[in-house]
Amino acid sequence: HRQHNHVLRLEARKPNAEGAGEVTLDDHLRSALRKRPDRIIIGECRGAEAYTMLEAMNTGHEGSLTTIHANDPVSALTRLVTLVKQGDPTLSEDTVRSKIAAALDLVVQVQRLSDGSRRITSIEAIGDNIDGHIQHEQLFYFDKSSPDAAPAHRSCRVQPGQVRQRICEAGYVYEPGWFIDELEAA
């Protein structure tokens, strides 16, 4: 691993034979939050640490990132609700969905294809929690059967309002052309 001055790598550890010494991802995440990080990256949320990660994302640790195993972006959101409730079972599902909608901007799906390669197959913008459903719009998808027979990423031609706002708030110029296929723009 390359060393960076402002990066701290932490790994979970199982308990020893006597049952002592366990350090969970949630332990590391809580410890990391005390260090006032700008970004938090968790390799994979599989349990109660999803609650702590979501709380971190909603309390000023924007740009943070984690992965969750699921079949598609909608399933990832459903799974995240389940994982967050492991961290705090007293929260209602609607409250958890509202926290997820407030914390997430995008869900990026990576899938292993039949040839063994991994590709980004979908990018969805996350919206508000309305009537118990997290709103989402697909921005891009992986077209396995494009006209020239070569797989390609395609735009859904959606101009994502909340993503556009976040891009501008970060000081960047929003270009509507980012969300139009190059072939269509030419």
Image: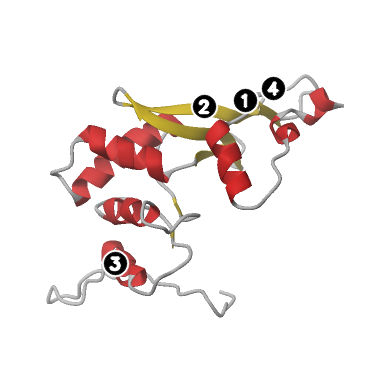
Q: Position of residue 14 (x, y in %)?
A: 25, 69
Task: Say which residue label 2 marks.
Answer: 137
Q: Earlier in the sequence, mark 1 or mark 3?
A: 3
Q: Position of residue 55 (x, y in %)?
A: 31, 53
Mark 2 or mark 4, which is nearer to you? 2
Contact flag, marks 1 and 3 (Cβ < 8 Å) = no
Q: Amino acid at mark 1?
A: Val
Point 53% across, 76% down: residue? 6
Give the distance between the C-alpha atoms of the residues marked 4 and 3, in whole angstroms.
45 Å
Task: Say which residue label 1 marks.
Answer: 158
Point 61% across, 45% down: residue? 167
Q: Is residue 55 left or right of residue 163?
A: left
Task: Say which residue label 3 marks.
Answer: 30
Q: Is residue 13 above or below residue 80?
A: below
Contact flag, marks 1 and 2 (Cβ < 8 Å) = yes
Q: Circle 1: is it few (<14), some (14-19), or many (20+) Cα within 10 Å?
A: some
